[in-house]
Amino acid sequence: MKRASFNFSLVNKHLKKVGKIILYLFATMLLGAFIGCGVASGNPFAIFFPTTWIHFFEFLS
């Protein structure tokens, strides 16, 4: 009896697509954060300040 082989190339193809989608979503979110902080505070790099994140998590709780 012949054993059927699993096609890993198909899995790799779909994982690459999912990885690209996740990468594009991350890049879009980062660009949106830059634009949002640039409009709100005038400094687009304010997204990297710890005080920004402290304020954000205090707002959520």
Image (cartoon, rainbow, N blue to C red):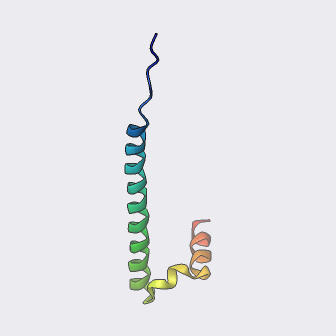
Total numbered circles? 0
Q: Is residue 58 above or below residue 1?
A: below
Residue 31, image x, y percentages: 39, 73
Residue ID at (40%, 50%) = 16
Residue 5, image x, y percentages: 44, 25
- Name the residue furthest bottom: 42
Q: Is residue 3 above or below residue 51?
A: above
- Name the residue furthest top: 1
Query: Which quadrant, please, contains the C terminus?
Result: bottom right
> For residue 58, which quarter of the picture?
bottom right
Q: Nearer the viewer, residue 11 or 60?
A: 11
Q: Nearer the viewer, residue 54 or 33?
A: 33
Residue 22, image x, y percentages: 43, 56
- 46 horizontally vs 31: left or right: right
Residue 26, image x, y percentages: 44, 64
> For residue 12, which quarter of the picture?
top left
Residue ID at (43%, 20%) = 4
- 35 horizontally vs 61: left or right: left
Q: Nearer the viewer, residue 17 or 31?
A: 17
Q: Is residue 23 above or below residue 30?
A: above
Residue ID at (54%, 80%) = 48
Q: Is residue 30 above or below residue 3?
A: below
